[in-house]
């Protein structure tokens, strides 16, 4: 019953102190239930909440990085890349880009962008591969 009540709560606004607690509980429950959609929603809210409260800090940056991880697992590559990009911007204000955390975040951003590129080119590769096979059949190969 408590689980149901927590999942039905809606955040008031990013600056409200209860919003952060509600979203943390919802993220925790979604993680326990392996509910990717609820996890992505709660993580998005948490990242935005932390960014609204403390704009240039490693805590909101790590929230956006975590959000990117969740969205990448959910297959939302465009949103994952946007989250990683925002985390990297926040990290680079506080740290040199060659520090370990910004480098890791940059690597994750590249992975999301490359995955998106592969996803966009997959239908083109299939068509090209199909044309090559049909040409080979015509030639008797």
Image: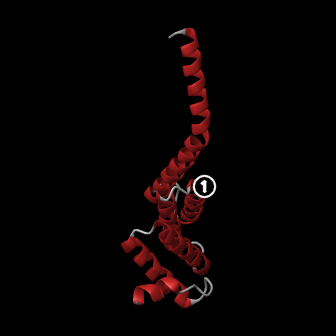
Q: Which residue is mark 1?
A: 78
Q: What residue is shown at x 55% (from left), y 63% (from top)?
A: 87
Where is residue 129 drawn, in percent x and y? 56, 26
Instruction: Name the residue nearer the viewer: 116 or 106.
Output: 116
Where is residue 48 drawn, in percent x and y? 59, 74
Where is residue 35 drawn, in percent x and y? 44, 69
Q: Quadrant of residue 114?
A: top right
Residue that protrudes farthest toward the top in the picture: 140
Residue 57 in view (yes/no): no
Instruction: Name the residue nearer the viewer: 27 or 66.
Output: 27
Q: What residue is shown at x 51% (from left), y 68% (from top)?
A: 37
Residue 79 in view (yes/no): yes
Looking at the image, residue 133 lies above or below residue 62? above
Looking at the image, residue 63 lies above or below residue 123? below
Q: What residue is shown at x 49% (from left), y 59% (from top)?
A: 74
Q: What residue is shown at x 61% (from left), y 43% (from top)?
A: 120
**Secondary structure under badge 1?**
helix
Label 1 crowding class (10 Å Cα cut-off): few <14, some 14-19, many 20+? Answer: some
């Amino acid at each position: 019953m408590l689980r149901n009540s927590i999942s039905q709560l809606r955040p008031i606004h990013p600056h409200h102190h209860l919003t952060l607690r509600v979203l943390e509980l919802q993220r925790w429950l979604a993680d326990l239930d392996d509910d990717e959609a609820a996890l992505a929603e709660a993580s998005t809210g948490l990242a935005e909440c932390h960014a609204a409260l403390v704009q240039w800090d490693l805590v909101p940056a790590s929230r956006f990085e975590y959000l990117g991880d969740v969205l990448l697992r959910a297959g939302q590559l465009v949103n994952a890349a946007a989250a990683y990009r925002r985390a990297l911007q926040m990290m680079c204000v506080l740290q040199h880009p060659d520090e370990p955390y910004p480098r890791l975040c940059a690597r994750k951003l590249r992975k999301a962008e490359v995955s998106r590129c592969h996803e966009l080119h997959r239908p083109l590769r299939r068509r090209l591969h199909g044309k090559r096979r049909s040409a080979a059949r015509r030639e008797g190969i």
